[in-house]
Each structure stands twice: as C-alpha cells, then as structure tokens.
Amino acid sequence: MSLRIALDLDGTLADMRSALQMVEDRLFGAGPADPGGPDDTERHAPAQDRTEAREARKVNASGLGVRKEGLTLRQQRRVWEAVAQIEDFWESLDEIEPGAVRAIASKAAQRRWEVIFFTKRPATTGRAVQLQTQRWLRARGFPLPSVSVVAGSRGKAADALEIDAVVDDSPQNCVDVRSESKAAAILVWRDASEAITVNAKRLGISVVSSAAEALKVLADLDEKRTHWTLADRVRRAVGLAHPTVNRL
C-alpha cells in the first residue's frame, strides 16, 4: 500500500517569510515595529486574532514554543490586506531549499507515494489560491500536484484523508496531527533548540532541520512499513500508533 503523505507549503517548502518581509518593509520601513495603540492588544483584537493568540498559548503549553512576530496585530492585518491586492502573490515565492520540490516529486514517483500539499493561504487578486499553488509546484518540478486549502485543523484533515505522515513547520499543526489522527508528524524547524527537540519527541513528533531531512525520514518510514506484520497493519487500521511511527 502506498505511503500517503501531506506536506505543508509556507515555511516548509515556500519562502513566504521573505516575500512578506518585502511587503512589511514597503509599508513600515526596515526599522523595528511601532508599539501600536491599545487596539493592538489581544483583549481588543478581532475574534480571529484572539483565536490565533489562544492557539499560540496552546503550543507554548506543549513545551514546543512558537516563533515571535515583530509586528503588532494591527500591522499584521495591514500586511495581509496589502498581500490580498498583489496579483498571483503565491506564485511569486521562492523555494526555501532550491530543488526540494523536484526532489520530493522524484522520490514520490520512485516509491509510488501519494502526495497532497496542505495550505491555508488567503485569497489574493488573480488566480484562485489552489491554482496559484499548483502552478508554483509544477514550475518547480512537481507534475500534476494535488493541493488542498485547509482552513481548519491539520489533524482532522489528515485523519479524514487517511494520511500516513504530515510534514509541517508549525508546532501546533504537528500537535494536532498527533492528537487527532493516526499520522506521523514531522516538524521542520530549522533553528530548533535541544529543548524543543526533546519536547517534540515526548509528544511523538519527529524534528528535522530541513525539507531534505524530512524526505529521508519519510523514506525510512516507508521502508519500515514494508516489514509490518499483519498485526501491525491491524493496529494501524484501528488507530493504534505503530512503534516505528514513534521512533521516526
């Protein structure tokens, strides 16, 4: 049975941070963010921002921590409003690791993997988000990419699609995958500290420093699956994690 893999895009394969930095610099200059007014606090923020703040605290409680943002909530909203006006913005991003998408496509073809790309990108002017993303992947060497725009939990999406492994740069997404699905979670964290790695492993999450390293972990998982016994496959079918998943 083919390995079913879900891969995140922004922060994992696509360099959204650099593209957003250009927008931020255009709006606010290259200096530090302004402290902002009272409406920039979480208490006065819109419901969506308060939800995001709560999600960040959930990740902190897990012991993984989150990356700090330099902009206030008001400034972040202005950035995304500006992005929404850029035609086909998602097609303009660079790869974080040049050649990574092509390498994934090659390995998937070789090992007969079924690959889907997860994203929660907001709409911009121009083509639909899904089509922009497909065109971006195809231009970088992945033919006929399958893209799902997932607004909700990655864990629930992985469970619904019977995904075997999810590769993502978000600690919260990886926690959701481990708690809400049978899939293995591989966290791409390029500057992970030892504490983050230890806490992630405690939660059954594998930590890697690059997409290339994640690809090696996926190949290792696929190789181990070929040696599963009937009992192992039954355990997987009923939702019990196989030991090899937790040893990624």
Image (cartoon, rainbow, N blue to C red):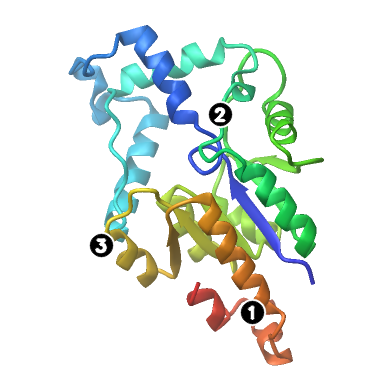
The amino acid type of the residue labelled 1 equals Lys
Disc 1 element: helix
* Residue linked to disc 2: 94
Q: Residues within 10 Å of mark 1 (few under 14, many from 20)?
A: few
The amino acid type of the residue labelled 2 equals Asp
Q: Nearer the viewer, residue 83 or 213?
A: 213
Disc 3 element: helix
Give coordinates of residue 164: x percent, y percent. 65, 65
Give coordinates of residue 148: x percent, y percent. 69, 41
Closer to the N terminus: mark 3 or mark 1?
3
Disc 2 element: loop
Front: mark 3 or 2: 2
Q: Is residue 202 above or below residue 113?
A: below
Disc marking residue 224 = 1
Q: In 3D space, how far apart are the residues under numbered discs 3 and 2 (Cα atoms)?
A: 30 Å
Task: Identify the image quadrant of the N terminus.
Answer: bottom right
Q: Is residue 181 left or right of residue 19?
A: right
Can residue 135 be seen from the camera position used here? yes
* Residue linked to disc 3: 195
Q: Is residue 83 above or below residue 173?
A: above
Can residue 78 be seen from the camera position used here? no
Q: Looking at the image, which residue is at 29% across and 47% down?
A: 57
Closer to the N terminus: mark 3 or mark 2?
2
Q: In 3D space, how far apart are the residues under numbered discs 1 and 2 (Cα atoms)?
A: 33 Å
